[in-house]
Amino acid sequence: MRFLLLFLAAAAQTPQGETLAVVLGTPITREAVEARAKGDLARLRQMDYEARRQALDALIADELLKKEAARRTLSVEALVEAEVVAKTAPVTAAEVDTQFAAMRARLGQRPEAEGRKLVEQNLAQQRRAERRAAYLKELRTKAGVRTSLEPPRFAVDAGDAPSKGPKSAPVTIVEFADFECPFCGRVAPTLKQVVDTYGDKVRLVFRDYPLPNHSKAPKASEAAACAGDQGQFWEMYDKLFAAGARLEEVDLKRHAIDLKLDSASFYECLDSGRKAADIARSVDAGQQLGISGTPAFYINGRLLSGAQPFERFAEIIDEELARVGKP
């Protein structure tokens, strides 16, 4: 018992070995607790950063608008009216028609006139927010604003996952995605634009993260991995993310025929389920990072969540290239 007490006292002096509980003589350490809660803690780190970043951006915006208004002898309200409201392009009837058609099912039983009015208001609000963001970006650039709030960086194991671009690239993007996820398919052309734009400065890595509510996604992931055995992972990736792609097993085999893969080898690989363990390991890696939805991207370890536009990828990539001295 004395030896155990001395051991626990020594362990408690080091953070990793700190004992948080003892169960029938067995110590439970802080390290073990953090390993069990790793995904939740990762989400909390990201949420903490995003809350601070939003507050910092709001304070910067307030200060920039106040100083610019004073320079032009205007009130902040008058400045916003002149630079944001007056310079926001009006929403056209054609734009309302297109958006209304896309949202018709989600508008429920609202009368058409009311639905169109709501769509128009949403588009106008979105356009005004975009103009405000663009104007604030102009002011930030002009003022030379620099920030020192560092985003959290997560250690993401790329392993031997499929990739594009050199391993020596200064920026690595690890994508966690689900082949049944419509948002993952929507961002696929954006990723192609990223690769085409940045060339060998960027390496793109794909990791599977089929969501529990997408029953066809795990087998689609296996199909991509089986195609990868024949050197055509990215070709199958494009097939699976193509608009309206079907993901039943018969469709997966049809995709293999379209790609002129060795059908016998592909069918054996898919039917055997031997890629399922690899997919499960990829999912586990994503869970350890706290991923709760797809797509999720880690750009040099920095999380970018959702089907973001090219400009958002470019913003982070440019920051990372500047950080390593390769703009």
Image (cartoon, rainbow, N blue to C red):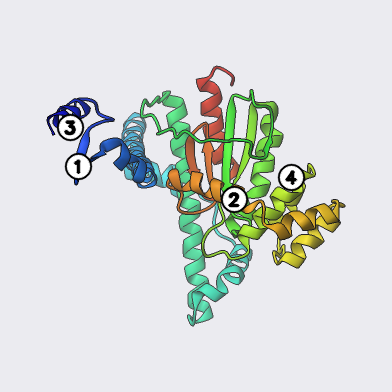
State the SS at label 3.
helix
Instruction: State the count of labels.
Output: 4
Say if residue 53 shows up in the picture. Answer: yes
State the SS at label 4.
helix
Q: Residue type at mark 3: give it.
A: Leu
Q: Position of residue 280 (x, y in %)?
A: 55, 51
Foreground label between 4 and 1: 1
The residue tagged 4 is 228
Who comes first in sequence, dot 4 or dot 3?
Answer: 3
Residue occupying image coordinates x 13% and y 34%? 1
The residue tagged 3 is 4
Q: On the rendered structure, is 32 left or right of 89?
A: left
Q: Residue type at mark 2: give it.
A: Ala
Q: Position of residue 172 (x, y in %)?
A: 58, 31
Who comes first in sequence, dot 2 or dot 3?
Answer: 3
Who comes first in sequence, dot 4 or dot 1?
Answer: 1
- Residue 28 against residue 258 in the figure, above or below: above
Who comes first in sequence, dot 2 or dot 1?
Answer: 1
Contact? badges 2 and 3 (CB < 8 Å):
no
Say if residue 242 shows up in the picture. Answer: no
Contact? badges 3 and 1 (CB < 8 Å):
yes
The residue tagged 2 is 277
- Quadrant hosting residue 311: top right
